[in-house]
Image (tube, rainbow, N blue to C red):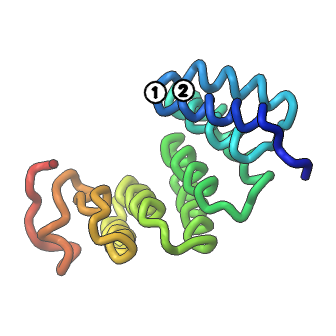
Amino acid sequence: MPLKSDKYFTVLELALLLYKKGEFQESLGLIREARELNRFDGALCHVGALCAFRLGDVAGAKLLIEDSIKEAPHEPIHWNVLGEVHRLSGDLFEAIKAFQQAIVLDPGIADVYSNLGNVYSDAGDYENAFAAYRKALAVDPNHLPAIRDPRGGHLQGFLADPLGGHCLPAM
């Protein structure tokens, strides 16, 4: 793989800055131009997928994140984004597979466990949802997404008994 030029890093930094500012369309346009030079650049595809996702283009996000995975299949963050794309498109089975692959690659990312818990919750499988949230909290005890009850409340009363306890109002 050839070394990246200063221009590449400038484009990537600008795309990330636009993304962080919420200017998803502008960031995606810049990424599409840059991708003409390097179609399977993992970082550009990843940011592009996030932008497309935020713009509601789930199919476009899926194509871009799959390109990221082709470039860097060992990066768990790409699999995490693919899982979210599958989840939002309603393909819960594929979402679970993507999150599980991210966990195989790096079991130390709390967000992946939370996202996996969300998929199980979407499927009504609260036992596995709570197990995934507990793993997220084992990785990071302050991980706020995992502290929420998948049924809409707060997990505090559920940590000892996943099927009992009480729900507090959502935070």
Along the line of sight, the residue nearer the viewer: 81 or 89? 81
Give the quadrant of residue 34.
Answer: top right
Along the line of sight, the residue nearer the viewer: 101 or 23? 23
Identified at 78% across, 31% down, the residue is 7
Q: Count of labels shown?
A: 2
Cα distance in 3D space between marks 1 and 2: 5 Å
| Residue extending furthest toward the right | 2
Q: Quick check: 137 above or below 117?
A: below
Q: x, y percentage for residue 12?
A: 67, 35
Give the quadrant of residue 14.
Answer: top right
Q: Check disc 2 and report its element: helix, strand or loop.
A: helix
Identified at 51% across, 44% down, the residue is 90
Along the line of sight, the residue nearer the viewer: 102 or 153? 102
Q: Quick check: 107 above or below 12?
A: below
Q: x, y percentage for residue 24?
A: 54, 25
Q: Do the CB atoms of the residues marked 1 and 2 lie less than 8 Å apart?
A: yes
Q: x, y percentage for residue 39?
A: 83, 37
Identified at 56% across, 47% down, the residue is 86
Give the quadrant of residue 117.
Answer: bottom left
Q: At label 2, which amino acid type do we have?
A: Leu
Question: Which residue is denoted by mark 2 in the rendering?
Answer: 18
Q: At label 1, which amino acid type do we have?
A: Lys
> 52 left or right of 20?
right
> 4 left or right of 27?
right
Question: Which residue is denoted by mark 1 in the rendering?
Answer: 21
Q: Check disc 1 and report its element: helix, strand or loop.
A: loop
Q: x, y percentage for residue 13?
A: 63, 35
